[in-house]
Image (cartoon, rainbow, N blue to C red):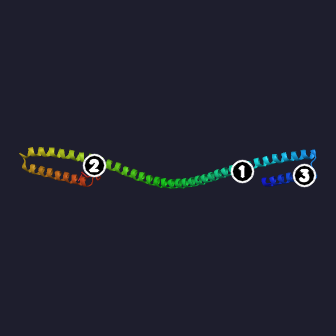
Amino acid sequence: MSIAMIVRRIAGVSSLVLALTLVVGCSTSDRSRVEQASQDNVALKAQVTDLTQERDNLKKELEVVTKSRDQYQEQVTQANKAASKMQSDLAEWRKTNDTTEIGLKSELSKAKSELDAAKKAQGDAEQTAIKLKAAEDAVTAARAKATEAERAAATASDKVTQLTAEATALRQKLEAVTAELAKKPAAAPDLNK
């Protein structure tokens, strides 16, 4: 039952009581009843006013609460959208990260094999350097023999010619070996030829 209906009923009852009192006649007891009814009517009107004011206050509070609820619902919607976007971004980042990781692993594998090849080439180069040193030592020894041969050339020109030819051949061989080594740093020359 609404407050307006309650007010109408109270007003109707008090008017009816007042009208009955006037029609029937006023005795003291009737007057006291009429006064009591009038006082009750005033008290009921005050209660109706209080209830109306309370209803208006409750309506205002309801509006405020509804507005707050709508704001919270909007915030929840925005938060859900943001969470969804974050999840999408995270999935994209994971995909990119996985792709990058695969690429880096591939590059690391390639770098390892290049490093292994470089180590092998370095070992080959060290072996070639050792062989080149041995060849240089052999050339030095050959030069020493050539020098001895030149000294002995004063006494034997045939032997000098022969030793000079050997020295020249050795020099050519050294130059050929050196040129070959320059062209192929990883190949080892065969010094036994």
Tag 3: amino acid: Leu
Q: Which residue is mark 2?
A: 128
Tag 2 and tag 1, C-beta contact below 8 Å: no
Image quarter (top left, top right, bottom left or bottom right) of the N terminus: bottom right
Q: Earlier in the sequence, mark 2 or mark 3?
A: 3
Mark 1 residue type: Asp
Within-10-Å neighbours for mark 1: few <14, some 14–19, many 20+: few
Disc 2 element: helix
Q: Which residue is mark 1?
A: 56
- Picture coordinates of residue 17 (x, y %)? 88, 51
Of the numbered discs 2 and 1, the one sitting upstream in the chain is: 1
Label 3 and label 1: CA atoms lie apart by: 37 Å
Q: Is residue 132 left or right of residue 21?
A: left
Rendered image: mark on residue 27: none
* Residue to which mark 3 is pinned: 22
* Foreground residue among 25 and 116: 25
- Which residue is located at x 90 percent, y 46 percent? 31
How far from the left and from the top, in percent, is residue 159?
10, 49
Mark 2 against mark 3, which lies toward the viewer? 3
The residues bearing labels 2 and 3 have C-alpha atoms spaced at a distance of: 141 Å
Looking at the image, is 143 positioned above or below residue 91? above
Find residue 68 and report its horizontal and vertical position in percent: 64, 50
Q: Are marks 3 and 1 in contact (CB under 8 Å)?
A: no
Query: What type is the residue that disc 2 sits on?
Result: Thr
With 70 as the anchor, is 31 left or right in this view? Answer: right
Task: Answer few, some or many: residues within 10 Å of disc 3's Cα (few below 14, many 20 plus, some between 14 and 19).
Answer: few
- Residue at 67% from the left image edge and 50% from the top image edge: 65
Q: Secondary structure at mark 3?
A: helix
The foreground one among 80 and 156 is 80
Q: CA distance from mark 2 to mark 1?
A: 104 Å
